[in-house]
Image: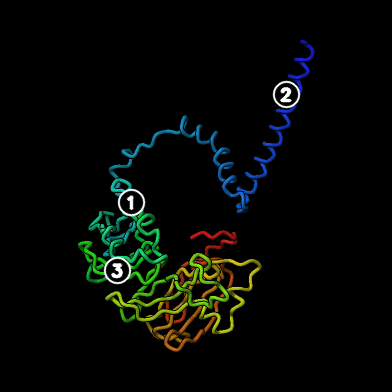
Amino acid sequence: MKIMFKKIELWVVALLFVIFLIVLIGYGAVLREELKQNKTRYWFLQKIALHIAEIPINIRNIIFSKPELPDIHAHKPRFKRFIQTEREELFLLARYDGDLKRGVVEIVDLNDFSVLHTFKPDVDEINNQTDTSRIVFKKLKTNNRPDRYLIIHPILLNNGDLVFHSDSPLVKIDYCSKLLWVNDNNIFHHSNNIDHEGNYWVPTKMYPFAVDKEIVSEQYDRYADDAIIKISPNGKILYQKSVSQILIEHGYKSLIFGINSYYKDPIHLNDIEPALNDGPFWNRGDVFLSLRDRSLILHYRPQSNQLINLISGPFLKQHDVDIISDKEISIFNNNNSILENSK
């Protein structure tokens, strides 16, 4: 009987070793895909594998890391070594305040980094003035509740008013954070810019889609129909045009749908830069559009629906196109070739 038990124990040990080896190999394969940033259909396992692999280093950091001693530099003005001379400049800082558990916007004096004013919009009031019966805002009061609302790309106007969004309706408040208007035409996202007439150009997602339903269907989450939109200082829509439609109308349908597999966000508009003055290569009122997922800049003339130029080059998944002189533009190159739908 003792010999039989020994054989059984050896068999169990061997089986457990084989199972452990299989699990170890599988874990290594999943971790390898995560480190290579390959998003497979088992991506949730990749994240778990990475967290497990980070346990030893996190334990080491908890045990051996030295506590920070902020008082050592308490007497020094922040970033003082970067300031050469006194200057009359302010910095508009949109951030999440962990103590208040909400998003705020601060006006900061760049001479001593003191906060001169703080905007705290009434998020509940903003949400209450939004038509949440529409499918585009179905999850608004959950995703954009006060403790989750992030104030994105605020514009500070000369009279102290503030224009912003949170991947949400576009909002304008006054200097005292009083709500002036909400435009809930659709979801606004990314950058906000002002043109020569004081209107706001903001990317939006159109729904219902402007693109033919035979191509993209009518299902809300089936396609991201990015559009350019011009809003008046009073919050009224002055102009709206689907970027997909611009490309289709000018013979560039292949830039949207000529990819190997169907992708619901082929444009990913992240900036609209209006031309404030005439130049040798553009007219006042023209706009430059940054199409991140096409690695492309469009020079477009809304007044006549003309696609003046398509600009591509040694940049990948760029953000932010700016006009820096009467004949030059700058492009912020993300240099990101990873096929991951990140912001």
**Label 2 SS:** helix
Rendered image coloring scheme: rainbow
Q: CA distance from mark 2 to mark 1?
A: 53 Å
Labels 3 and 2 touching (C-beta < 8 A): no
Q: Which residue is mark 1?
A: 147
User: Which badge, 2 or 1, comes first in the chain's sequence?
Assistant: 2
Query: Which residue is located at x 28 percent, y 54 percent?
Result: 113
Residue 88: x and y, percent?
A: 26, 65
Q: Is residue 91 visible?
A: no
Q: Which residue is mark 2?
A: 12
Residue 327: x and y, percent?
A: 46, 81
Residue nearer the viewer, 196 or 314: 196
Q: Which three-letter amino acid code belongs to the residue tagged 1?
A: Asp
Query: Which residue is located at x 54 percent, y 40 percent?
Result: 51
Residue 182 badge? 3
Query: Which residue is located at x 69 percent, y 39 percent?
Result: 25
Q: Which quadrant is home to the N terminus?
A: top right
- Judge whether 4 appears above or below 79 on screen: above
